[in-house]
Image: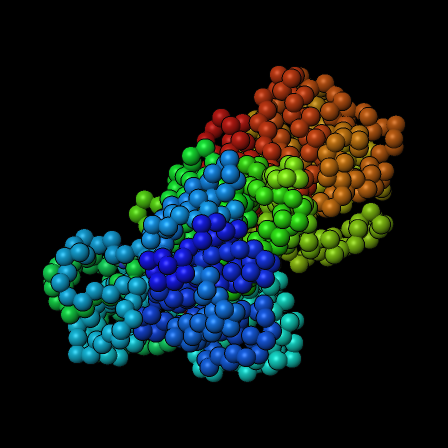
């Protein structure tokens, strides 16, 4: 027998699992089912994990319990009935005990035991673990099922250890009943734990003082019986419901709206918000508008409507104002669900201390001193949160290959592959680790997905003759980048949240969970498995195998665009007229671009008649540099309307007057009509720069796609004609050559909006074969010396990528100053979609910065 009173710890097992909460129990169940020998360890005296420790008054789940439950065994679901919409901690703990008993799991769990150290033995191909009871265990695979919010942060407050009264930590609540009757109680912290316990403590205490550093967004849970509609859906089609949860964004089947907060009328905004408020569910209030997670205006509508509710509930206006979160977007700190939280502040014996106004100076032996007063308490409750996600993992002394520790490797933030494994730590798995959806999802759906993936992986390794698995550095770096890309398009990084590690002093500021969605994440994991464990190196008796690569390289919002576009008909199957009508109809549904100082439509004289143009003026006083812009569309499609959002963006970012010129299109007017018009337009804008509000001599050209082709060509024509002087050329994904055989055509010619077939369709409409190699059709074939400085932007997943880069190289070789910008994860069309593709914004900012070097005078935006 070992020191914890259970069976002796085996010296060798196939798998060690750390944790006996929801994830550890299910992992153990799956391992046993597959015939692996396994043992689990937990510091607690029984199963439950989070639900073992967090016994504070009011503790309950905030995902509906119908969804916050295992789905792996239909019989288990049939046999268990939840009594409430959001079950209490005792009920959830009872459920977990029931699960442990039902599947006889306790016999393989060693309670009261921590794994204190783990070291990888490369020669043996095994992990060697040490326990707090002094036992040593060797295992082939080591699974950390230790939870994301299991390492309490503790009160990092001056003098906290000095207090002589009763002290409670919500995350380590005593098992015996705590009675606050007649006592003066302080609660420090207003996150989910604080917000849940404050109303109940107020119900007992003689006086309650709440110390709030940051106000939190909280909405009423409307708890009660489990919602009948959900029970009915489950009863009608249990598996269908669970499957919908697995493929949903958050792990709960929910409406995915396409109503944008920015464009919805006020009445619809309020209606949607009220419905979400009444639903009393996190994913409802997080999904009022399609764009609230990344558009600050849309987010601001939800935030303000919640503040209105707080002001309407809390009677004292100063207290209400202090309880209103104002300095971070809604949802970017974990929102809370409550029962009478704000109402509690109307009670005469409850008081709020706003630490932003009156900070804590020190905890004393008898209470808390703030900057203004000395307060005495019989009990202090610290609801101060956790060292989330990474904390529980690095708190164990884990040493991988070459003596590297996990804490050392993650010193500047976690790096993982799929949140499941990390390079340098073979056979080491994490359940709901950093860079997996975990805390942003219904934990149960994420836990089951992770456990199933790991179990399937271990079974497969055994079947295929491998004993060692480790992600490659390339695959891991790609996943880390993808995580960052996903976070970058949201508002989440604006808050000092535990998602960002910002609640723990000294912790690196990195967005920890994967925010691409449960569905997208599951798809990535399935693809990795389907591609022979893509991105992993496998070794064993069967030899070595590695199908290396990066599983997600396209920017996340571009990926959504591609999904939408995949459902649309292909343009090259249409006539030019039908294609124009089709694209104009799509353009009409797009939101407008940003406001600029002034927009004016006009006409300028072209060689075959007037050419329409649209002028964009920055809000600042002029004169400004001037850019003559040519839209994209393969010389066949597009107009000053199609590129309107991009021109607005360009005008604002560069502080230049942008003149977007419509030129004649093929097939009605074939090559070189567009070239003639473009050159005439540049001559006209240069001659009229002053009248247009531009600075004479500071006229540049810019264009996207076929427009980039025209911009490049006009620079060559202007040089050869001895004028006008062009300050610079911005070539965005330009067509520079008629050769469709370049490697980027084979890499990117299918599935990225602009296809090889479409490009051929454009060329065929535009120019005869014999004309295409002329430098004014294929500027790459021209003489490039003496051209104005260039900014050349290419997109990674564009068939035109190689010819753009070839043009940049050729310009450089010819002595032209070039700034080349390679847009990672972008496609041909995404960078100009200033109104829709957020991940293009940093590229457009870099573009604008590069342009500013052309102009000697300071640019005022
Ligand atoms: P938390 O959200 O991190 O909240 C901690 C609170 O303590 C915050 O208000 C924080 O202020 C405050 N605080 C921390 N250190 C402080 C200091 N030195 N001085 C003053 N105030 C301090 O932690 P939590 O409430 O335990 O919740 C953590 C997460 O656990 C939740 O977000 C949720 O995911 C999960 N949870 C879920 C439930 C549920 O309903 N199922 C219940 C509880 C917890 P700042 O905001 O300024 O840092």
| Residue lying at the far front of the rendered structure | 1
Q: Position of residue 148 (x, y in %)?
A: 42, 56
Q: Is residue 706 visible?
A: no
Q: Position of residue 799 (x, y in %)?
A: 73, 37
Of 128 and 400, nearer the camera is 128
The image quadrant that residue 467 belongs to is top right
Q: Position of residue 354 (x, y in %)?
A: 24, 62
What residue is rendered at 74% in x and 43% in y?
Answer: 754
The image quadrant where one finds ligand 1 is bottom left
Instruction: Give above or below for 186 relative to 438.
Output: below
What colour scheme governs how the chains and residues are painted in the rendered image of this protein?
rainbow
What residue is rendered at 79% in x and 54% in y?
Answer: 569
Of 833 and 292, nearer the camera is 292
What residue is rendered at 13% in x and 63% in y?
Answer: 164
Instruction: Give above or below for 68 relative to 725.
Output: below
The image quadrant that residue 58 belongs to is bottom left
Viewport quadrant of the N terminus: bottom left
Q: Is residue 427 visible?
A: yes
Of 853 and 468, nearer the camera is 468
What residue is rendered at 11% in x and 60% in y?
Answer: 365
């Amino acid at each position: 027998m070992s020191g914890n009173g259970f069976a002796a710890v085996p010296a060798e097992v196939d798998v060690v699992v750390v944790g006996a909460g929801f994830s550890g129990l299910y992992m153990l169940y799956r391992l046993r089912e597959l015939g692996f020998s396994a043992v689990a360890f937990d510091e607690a005296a029984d199963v439950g994990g989070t639900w073992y420790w967090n016994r504070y008054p009011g503790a309950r789940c905030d995902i509906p319990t119908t969804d916050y439950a295992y789905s792996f065994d239909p019989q288990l679901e049939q046999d268990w009935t939840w009594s409430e919409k959001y079950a209490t901690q005792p009920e959830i703990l009872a459920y977990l005990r029931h699960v442990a008993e039902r599947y006889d799991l306790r016999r393989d769990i060693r309670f009261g035991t921590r794994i204190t150290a783990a070291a990888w033995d490369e020669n043996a191909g095994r992990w060697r673990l040490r326990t707090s009871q002094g036992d040593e265990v060797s295992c082939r695979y080591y699974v950390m099922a230790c939870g994301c919010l299991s390492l309490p942060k503790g009160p990092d407050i001056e003098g906290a250890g000095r207090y002589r009264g009763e002290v409670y930590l919500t995350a380590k609540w005593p098992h015996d009943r705590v009675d606050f009757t007649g006592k003066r109680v302080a609660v420090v912290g207003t996150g989910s734990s604080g917000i849940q316990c404050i109303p109940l403590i107020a119900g007992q205490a003689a006086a309650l003082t709440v110390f709030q550093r940051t106000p939190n967004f909280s909405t009423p849970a409307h708890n009660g019986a489990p919602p009948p509609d959900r029970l009915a859906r489950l009863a009608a089609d249990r598996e269908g419901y669970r499957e919908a949860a697995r493929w949903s964004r958050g792990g709960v089947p929910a409406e995915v709206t396409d109503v944008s907060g920015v464009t919805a009328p006020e009445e619809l905004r309020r209606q949607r918000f009220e419905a979400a408020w009444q639903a009393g569910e996190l994913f409802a209030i997080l999904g009022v508008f399609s764009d609230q997670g990344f558009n600050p205006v849309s987010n601001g509508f939800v935030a303000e409507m919640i503040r209105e509710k707080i002001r309407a509930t809390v009677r004292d206006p100063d207290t209400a104002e202090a309880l209103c979160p104002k300095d971070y977007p809604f949802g970017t700190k974990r929102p809370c669900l409550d029962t009478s939280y704000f109402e509690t502040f109307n009670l005469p014996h409850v008081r709020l201390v706003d630490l932003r106004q009156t900070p804590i100076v020190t905890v004393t032996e008898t209470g808390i001193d703030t900057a203004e007063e000395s307060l005495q308490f019989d009990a202090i409750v610290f609801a101060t949160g956790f060292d989330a996600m990474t904390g529980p993992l690095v708190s164990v002394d884990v040493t991988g290959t070459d003596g590297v520790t996990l804490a050392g490797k993650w010193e500047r933030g976690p790096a993982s592959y799929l949140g499941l494994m990390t390079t340098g730590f073979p056979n080491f798995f994490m359940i709901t680790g950093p860079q997996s959806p975990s805390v942003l999802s219904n934990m149960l759906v994420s836990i089951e997905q992770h456990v199933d993936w790991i179990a399937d992986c271990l079974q497969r390794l055994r079947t295929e003759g491998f004993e060692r698995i480790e992600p490659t550095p390339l695959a891991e770096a790609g996943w880390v980048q993808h995580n960052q890309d996903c976070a970058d398009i949201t508002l989440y990084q604006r808050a000092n949240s535990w998602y960002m590690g910002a609640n723990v002093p000294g912790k690196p500021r990195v967005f920890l969970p994967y925010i691409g969605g449960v569905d997208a994440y599951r798809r990535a994991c399935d693809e990795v498995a389907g591609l022979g464990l893509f991105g992993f190196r496998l070794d064993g008796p069967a030899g070595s195998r590695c199908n290396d690569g990066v599983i997600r390289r396209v920017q996340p919002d571009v990926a959504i665009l591609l999904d939408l576009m995949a459902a649309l008909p292909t343009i090259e199957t249409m006539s030019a007229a039908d294609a124009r009508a089709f694209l104009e109809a799509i353009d009409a549904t797009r939101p407008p671009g940003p406001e600029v100082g002034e927009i004016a439509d006009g006409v300028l004289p072209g060689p075959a008649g007037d050419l329409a143009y649209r002028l964009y003026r920055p809000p600042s006083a002029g004169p400004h540099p001037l850019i003559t812009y040519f839209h994209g569309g393969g010389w066949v499609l597009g107009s000053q309307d199609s590129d309107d959002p991009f021109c607005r963006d360009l005008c604002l970012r560069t502080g230049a007057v942008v003149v977007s010129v419509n030129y004649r299109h093929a097939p009605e007017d074939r090559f070189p009509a567009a070239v003639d018009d473009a050159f005439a337009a540049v001559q006209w804008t240069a001659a009229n720069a002053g009248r247009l509000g531009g600075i004479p001599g500071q006229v540049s050209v810019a264009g996207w796609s076929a427009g980039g082709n025209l911009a490049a060509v006009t620079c060559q024509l202007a040089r050869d004609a001895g004028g006008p002087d062009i300050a610079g050329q911005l070539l965005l994904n330009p067509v520079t050559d008629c050769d469709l055989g370049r490697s980027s055509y084979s890499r990117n010619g299918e599935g990225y909006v602009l296809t090889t077939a479409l490009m051929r369709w454009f060329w065929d409409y535009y120019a005869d074969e014999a004309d295409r190699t002329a430098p004014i059709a294929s500027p790459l074939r021209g003489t490039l010396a003496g051209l104005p400085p260039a900014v050349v932007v290419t997109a990674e997943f564009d068939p035109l990528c190689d010819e753009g880069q070839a043009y940049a190289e050729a310009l450089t070789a010819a002595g032209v100053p070039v700034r080349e910008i390679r847009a990672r994860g972008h496609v041909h069309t995404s960078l100009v979609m200033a109104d829709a593709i957020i991940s293009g914004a940093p590229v457009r900012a870099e573009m604008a910065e590069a342009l500013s070097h052309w102009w000697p005078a300071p640019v005022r935006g």
